[in-house]
Amino acid sequence: MYFFFIYGKKKTHIKSDTNHEYVCQNCNHSDLDVHVYREYFHLLFLPIIPVGAKEVKIRCNNCEQLKWIASLEKHYEKTSRTPFYLYTGLGILIGLILFAFIAGLQGKKENILFVENPHVGDVYTIKHEKKDSTSYYFFRIAQIEGDSVSVYHNNLIYYGYVSKFNEQDFFMKDEKFLFTKKMLKEMLEKGEIDNVDRDYGVYEGFNRIQ
């Protein structure tokens, strides 16, 4: 399967006007047609952001001769507003960044609440960092007795972040580890607990225990 991106620069018309303040030296008529254009960068034909300077084209409506009037061009470059739609892609990008930031904050708050109030079945994504590598594995809460929390360890180690099990992975019911709630909070504060899943479905594979 091949993917390709259509990107580049395009030019769009942003303003039209008729000016009667200047006289055409060719026909002595004061009837100038003014058009302003702006280039923009696009991706998949979606405007991302305007680029370069505005372009002003002036033509006499009577003799149709193109005119180059510096003061008039500067006036229209200054007064012609760039349409907001040319910032569509930039707006979407900023929106996605804000969404990811807010979602990250919400996820951190949720992790704190889940670790402070653990439930049987909660799955912890554990992040283990060495000098040159980072690995991930999973705990699933098997039993809670007072301040003690016993967990199942999963079978595989992952050397990249994952949010669901490999098809061959499962939790090992014959191998349990014991923690206190305080220890789990400390692991979360240190960043060792990277994420907590609760109310997950079959897709994640966290229900597989052997």
Image: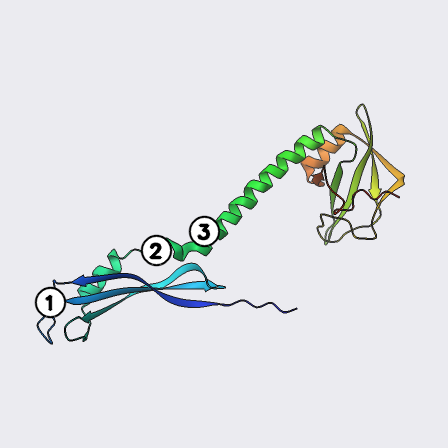
Residue at figure coordinates x 80%, y 42% from the top left: 207
* Horizontal side of residue 80 vs 94, given as left or right: left
Q: Position of residue 46 (x, y in %)?
A: 46, 60
Which of the pair 7/97 is nearer the observer? 7
Position of residue 71 measured from the top left corner of the image (x, y, whole percent):
18, 64
Q: CA distance from mark 3 to mark 2?
A: 13 Å
Callout in the foreground (1, 3): 1
Q: Earlier in the sequence, mark 1 or mark 2?
A: 1
Image position of 179 with respect to 91: above or below: above
Q: Secondary structure at mark 2?
A: loop
Residue at the disc numbered 3: 91
Q: Helix, strand, or loop for circle 1?
A: loop
- 50 w.r.t. 110: above or below: below
Q: Residue beneath label 2, please?
A: 83
User: As displayed, is residue 164 above or below residue 143?
Assistant: below
Which image quadrant for residue 110?
A: top right
> Which amino acid type is shown beneath numbered disc 3?
Gly
- Work out how far the residue at label 1 is from the one at label 2, CA to CA, in angstroms: 29 Å
Q: Is residue 30 left or right of residue 16?
A: left
Label located before the other in sequence (1 or 3): 1
User: What's the distance in space between the residues labelled 1 and 3, CA to CA?
Assistant: 41 Å
116 relative position to 151: left or right: left
In this view, the residue farthest toward the left is: 28
Pick the quarter of the image with the N terminus: bottom right
Lower position in the chain sequence, tag 3 or tag 2: 2
- The amino acid on which the numbered mark 2 sits, given as a three-letter code, is Pro
Binning the other alpha carbons within 10 Å of mark 1 as few (below 14), some (14 to 19) or many (20 upward) gives: some
Q: Amino acid at mark 1?
A: Ser
Which residue, as the protein is rendered here, is positioned at the far top? 146
Residue at numbered disc 1 = 30
Left or right of 186 in this view: 70 = left
Does dot 3 land on a helix, a strand or a loop? helix
